[in-house]
């Protein structure tokens, strides 16, 4: 396998090359030879998903805060990149240094959800790392897992050397030091694993052996080392000790959650009986309002994000939200930075909170009743009423929200046809509330997911409904819900089926994973790639009946994760299961007595609620204040004054593989970090008033790009402003000049390009350029929206000069709002070749002028 290669060998040939670029602002770049321990952190899904994941970023910054530790990142490649790497015999490498993953001491892989498991095999195989732990010796990296699926990692256990259960902030450093010392002492792998198993929270699968009955159930789990009978989840006692995201990674390309996330609290004890997160992230640990404000303020300053998300399993339950949110909005609203709360619980969204949220832009509004009927909500211990939901909806619509998302599950334990019909009625009532509360059109988006029983929950013994039953229920909802004003969406029952198989699966599934991966299964969390038939064929080859994994479990049955504990007693889970069938309520221990779940010792592990009493009092006080003032919903820039400047910049090197919209976002964030205040557009989604020159083709470098910024005040010193901007630019972008502007963007320009061709010109091809220049008409056909469009590109080519067989100069004319031609598109058309043949060419824009 080829070890070292330039990114130009891959980036021009794949879709969305920004996924593989790296160079993000606040990324860590350390010298390999000057550090003693090297860790690669892997998220087994595409970049846009993995970069949205807080956990990996947290560990990345913690590790890199230590001088002798180097941590770099890697994400699962898309299929086109995987195929390219294989065809060219290239290894999968880290983003920061393009170093092969096999070179690292530790490869840490997140286990975020079940449908990413085949991606783990893709990453290991592309890295040249044997898939199974038993096939790897001490010359290979230690492969460590962790994340929300780590509490039942059995389906993938054979691929991992060790798996961390629970919080990783403290444990990751202990693991790193353990492996570092073992490497120094040149220990054999079995000795390294024994030392890892001694770290609290670390599970070494090879020290346990499940034995199966003929029917596939587990007869026993053999403990091969008596020193480690049960592995207990690691719990971080105090969130306030950590301030790891003061310099958050800022993506260059678009990601799913493109914002600054501040974790206001970890854990939830509302006690929803279907919810695994409510068990495996206990107890509740809140940050202080002061720390939240500092993290938000510093994080925004060091990132340039225009959205701040307050993260928690239920942000509305944060005890000091009524005071913290207004403080944050007062700080950020004038800069058009919105504050969102992605996980709000019905009943915690007060009118005061909604008033605050909408001050900049109305972020998404999602409510999760989970079940349609009051009865079924009692079964799952949801603790909200129909009136709670309708009141929240009425307030939201009255404050101007036009779209409401309602999330429900189907297939919950004890569900009846009446419970399904209740979903239809609740959606109708919500729509009616919207019509009454506000003018205009209101849209209700009803989202349906199939209930999947999860390990370590009271419902871990319950069955999962079949795909056929899911489809039947969804079809019933389709027929019952009005089409006008209510939009129904649902999670694919086939994907939910496979999630259910792996959620409560055992080690026999590792053979299935390897078999189906070899058949081509990839990126199963994406509907575009998912193919259940492939999984069923592989299951038949492995003599596995997948339906059996969805069956109910007996209360005395040995479960695949029996040797792993979340810290919550099994007796508590059984008690909650009994209360579910009795429709009995379990209160939240944050506000009521301890419910005796068994987790807290009240010495090192206990709930940390800052001040629930103060939170309630300040909510009333804040309500009185909000009644006395008008809350501004617009950024407070002086829209009557406009000082416009043209900023000329270059984009050189690999950053040329970012698209036009990605460059726009980078510039907006650079301006915020450089503290250059712009005017903002008005309306629903205010954005900086910055105008950009014509879009550049992806892969084109340039010495002559520009944007025009509209400021409310003049710049005191242009050279100083230039220096401030360049300090915030990612590698490859450099401001060359700043000058006063009249604000207009040229409508017709001529751009000059220097092209180094790969492959070089053949002798006979020189004549084709002469023929092109001699004609006045040269038609190029394009397919847009399944229609063929013909464009005469000859008037758009102002000049061609061939320097030698591999370089030429080209001048192209472009007009605003009219179809143009790209440099390589023109060259390929003239040479009667496919443009794909020239993707390795180097295109440099050297200048432009107005016509």
Image (cartoon, rainbow, N blue to C red):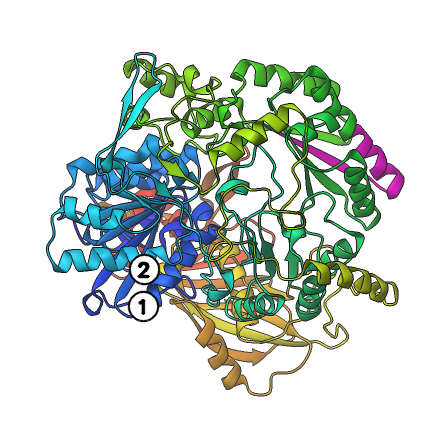
Q: Which residues are magenta?
A: 427-448
Q: Nearer the viewer, residue 409 or 434?
A: 409
Left or right: residue 35 versus residue 215 is: left
Crowdedness of circle 2 by 10 Å Cα count: few (<14), some, many (20+)? some
Q: Residue at x 46, y 20 (%)?
A: 553
Q: Indicate yes or no whether the magenta region holds residue 819.
A: no
Does 496 sit above or below residue 124?
Answer: above
Q: How many marks?
A: 2
**x, y (%) of residue 259?**
55, 57
Q: Residue at x 35, y 34 (%)?
A: 563
Does 146 sit above or below residue 807?
Answer: above
Residues at badges 2 and 1 in contact (C-beta under 8 Å)?
A: yes
Q: Residue at x 34, y 37 (%)?
A: 119
Left or right: residue 344 versus residue 794 is: right
Task: Of the two numbered discs 2 and 1 on the same chain, state the one appearing first in sequence.
Answer: 1
**x, y (%) of residue 502?**
41, 28
Residue 580: name its quadrant: top right
């Amino acid at each position: 396998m080829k070890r070292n290669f330039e990114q130009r060998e891959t980036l021009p040939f794949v879709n969305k090359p920004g996924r593989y670029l790296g160079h993000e602002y606040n990324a860590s770049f350390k010298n390999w030879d000057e550090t003693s321990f090297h860790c690669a952190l892997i998220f087994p899904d595409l970049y846009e998903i993995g970069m949205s994941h807080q956990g990996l970023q947290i560990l990345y910054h913690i590790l890199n805060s230590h001088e002798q530790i180097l941590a770099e990142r890697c994400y699962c490649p898309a299929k086109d990149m995987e195929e390219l790497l294989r065809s060219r015999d290239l290894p999968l490498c880290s983003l920061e240094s393009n170093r092969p993953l096999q070179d690292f001491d530790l490869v840490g892989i997140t286990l975020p959800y079940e449908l990413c498991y085949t991606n783990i095999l893709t990453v290991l195989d592309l890295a040249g790392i044997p898939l199974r732990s038993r096939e790897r010796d001490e010359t290979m990296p230690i492969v460590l897992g962790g994340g929300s699926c780590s509490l039942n990692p059995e389906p993938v256990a054979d691929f991992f050397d060790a798996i961390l259960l629970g919080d990783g902030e403290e444990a990751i450093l202990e693991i790193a030091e353990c492996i570092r010392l073992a490497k120094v002492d040149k220990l054999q792998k079995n000795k390294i694993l024994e030392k890892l198993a001694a770290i609290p929270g670390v599970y070494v699968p090879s020290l346990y052996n499940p034995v199966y009955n003929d029917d596939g159930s587990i007869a026993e789990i053999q403990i091969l080392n008596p020193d480690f009978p049960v592995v207990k989840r690691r719990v971080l006692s105090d969130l306030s000790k950590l301030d790891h995201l003061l310099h958050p990674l800022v993506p260059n390309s678009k990601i799913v959650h493109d914002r600054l996330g501040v974790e206001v609290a970890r854990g939830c004890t509302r006690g929803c009986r279907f919810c695994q997160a409510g068990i495996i992230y206990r107890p509740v640990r809140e940050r202080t309002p002061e720390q939240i404000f500092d993290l938000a303020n510093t994080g925004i300053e060091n990132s340039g994000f225009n959205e701040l998300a307050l993260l928690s399993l239920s942000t509305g339950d944060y005890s000091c939200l009524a005071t913290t949110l207004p403080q944050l909005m007062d700080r950020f609203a004038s800069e058009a930075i919105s504050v969102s709360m992605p996980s709000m619980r019905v009943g915690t969204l007060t009118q005061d909170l909604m008033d605050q949220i909408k001050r900049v832009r109305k972020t998404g509004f999602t409510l999760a009743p989970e079940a349609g009927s009051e009865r079924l909500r009692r079964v799952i211990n949801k603790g909200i009423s129909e009136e709670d939901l309708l009141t929240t909806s009425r307030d939201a619509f009255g404050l101007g929200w036009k779209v409401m998302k309602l999330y429900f599950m189907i297939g919950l334990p004890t569900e009846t046809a009446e419970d399904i019909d209740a979903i239809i009625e609740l959606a109708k009532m919500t729509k009616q509330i919207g019509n009454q509360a506000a003018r205009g059109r209101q849209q209700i988006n009803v989202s349906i997911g199939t209930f999947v029983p999860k390990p370590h929950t009271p419902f871990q013994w319950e069955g999962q409904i079949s795909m056929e039953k899911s489809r039947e229920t969804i079809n019933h909802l389709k027929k019952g819900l009005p089409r006008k004003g209510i939009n129904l969406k649902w999670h694919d029952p086939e994907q939910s089926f496979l999630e259910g198989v792996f959620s409560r699966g055992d080690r026999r599934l590792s053979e299935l994973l390897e078999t189906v991966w070899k058949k081509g299964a990839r990126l199963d969390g994406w509907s575009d790639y998912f193919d259940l038939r492939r999984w069923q064929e592989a299951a038949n080859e492995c003599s596995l009946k997948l339906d059996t994994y969805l069956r109910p479990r007996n209360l005395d049955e040995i479960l695949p994760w029996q040797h792993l504990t979340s810290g919550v007693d099994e007796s508590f889970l059984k008690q909650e299961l009994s209360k579910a069938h009795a429709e009995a309520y379990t209160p939240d221990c944050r506000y009521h007595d301890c419910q005796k779940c068994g987790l807290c010792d009240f010495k090192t592990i206990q709930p940390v609620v800052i001040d629930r009493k103060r939170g309630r009092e300040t909510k009333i006080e804040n309500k009185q204040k909000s009644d006395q003032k008008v809350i501004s919903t617009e950024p407070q820039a002086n829209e009557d004054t406009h000082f416009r400047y043209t900023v000329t910049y270059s984009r050189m090197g690999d950053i040329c593989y970012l698209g036009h919209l990605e460059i726009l976002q980078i510039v907006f964030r650079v301006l915020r970090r450089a503290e250059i205040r712009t005017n903002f557009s008005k309306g629903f989604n205010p954005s900086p008033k910055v105008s950009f020159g014509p879009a550049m083709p992806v892969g084109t470098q340039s010495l002559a790009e520009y944007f025009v910024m509209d400021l409310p005040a003049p710049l005191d010193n242009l050279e100083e402003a230039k220096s401030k901007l360049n300090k915030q630019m990612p590698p490859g972008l450099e401001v060359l000049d700043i000058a006063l502007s009249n604000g207009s963007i040229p409508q017709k320009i001529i751009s000059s390009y220097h092209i180094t061709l790969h492959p070089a010109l053949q002798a006979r091809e020189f004549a084709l350029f002469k023929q092109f220049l001699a004609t006045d008409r040269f038609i190029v056909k394009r397919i847009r929206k399944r229609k063929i469009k013909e464009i005469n590109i000859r008037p758009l080519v102002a000049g061609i000069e061939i320097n030698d067989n591999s370089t030429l100069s080209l001048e192209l004319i472009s007009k605003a709002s009219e179809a143009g031609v790209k440099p390589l598109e023109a060259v390929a058309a003239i040479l009667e070749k496919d443009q794909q043949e020239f993707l390795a060419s180097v295109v440099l824009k050297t200048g432009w002028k107005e016509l």
